[in-house]
Image (cartoon, grey):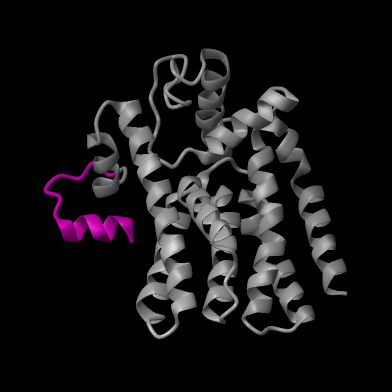
Amino acid sequence: MAVLLLVATAVLFLANTWPRTTGPFGNSHDGRNGAVWASGSRALREEGPWESRLGSVRQDGFVYANHPPLMLWSMAGSETILGERPWTSRLPTVAATLASIGLLYAVARGAGIRPIAASFGTAVAFTSPMALLYGTMPDTPIFSLAFGAAILVLWQRAWLGTPAPRLLLLGTSVLAALSGWEAALLAATAAASLVLLGRSRSDRRRAGISMAIGVAAGTVGTVLWATWAYGSTSVLLDQMVRRSSGAGGMTPQLAVDNQL
């Protein structure tokens, strides 16, 4: 019954969002986000990885590398294989949202929630207006949700004494850091908790160290990519400190407040 409910949730999500998934990009939040990332994907596919600096430099000369690049690269792969269409541009995000359904169910089960209750809670989440409206939009918070949920599953396993293989911990953490800042922060928090709070358990510490190495590698990769795109770290640092406000007189406290 739990599995059937999860499948029904995925089918309902696809049926409800299919017109937006296949529709053209317009003058909307979805359209502007999709246009930014799809333009980078086109540059990567048509100009090549060097000229486009791995998709960060568009064909009109605009440079955008404020967020980790895995969604951009996944979009380029989807469009290369299936052709450049609105639904292929949105496919990585849609696939990540569908994967999140199963992964968040696994998180609930790992927390001790019974199968029917866990599947019902997951169904409520993914048929909510938030999920149905934004679940297909090409943007890193939506795309990285699946990787964040995967990190939670691996963290639960490690905390309960049955850690996943080191290579899986390392690889998932790298992908999480490359998928979005939110997933990178979550993975770093999970790694720190295993290392710092699991001192009496060597298996927890080893899992935490593997995750920490993966997060560090993915984050450094993002920073190097952005630095190559912009020619320095100043643009990325300015985004981290000021966000989009451009407010003057910035202090460390205001920077933290902006991020929160």
Name the residue at 75% across, 74% down: 120
**Residue 207 image position (x, y, % from top left):** 48, 68
Residue 146 shown in magenta:
no
Examine the rendered structure and indicate whether residue 234 appears above or below residue 207. above
The N terminus sits in image quarter: bottom right
Q: Nearer the viewer, residue 254 or 1?
A: 1
Can residue 100 be seen by looking at this rendering?
yes
The C terminus sits in image quarter: bottom left
**Residue 52 image position (x, y, % from top left):** 45, 19
Examine the rendered structure and indicate whether residue 228 appears above or below residue 182. above
Can residue 126 be seen by looking at this rendering?
no
Q: How many marks?
A: 0
Q: Answer with left or right where residue 111 lies relative to residue 252.
A: right
Residue 248 shown in magenta:
yes
**Residue 173 image position (x, y, % from top left):** 49, 56
Q: Which residues are magenta?
A: 245-260
Name the residue at 47% across, 45% down: 178
**Residue 177 image position (x, y, % from top left):** 45, 51
Name the residue at 72% across, 77% down: 118
Q: Nearer the viewer, residue 93 or 126?
A: 93
Q: Answer with left or right where residue 190 lies relative to residue 35.
A: left
Examine the rendered structure and indicate whether residue 131 appears above or below residue 196. above
Task: Determine which quarter of the picture holds residue 146.
Answer: bottom right
Q: Nearer the viewer, residue 99 or 126?
A: 99
Hey, which residue is sitting farthest left in the picture? 249
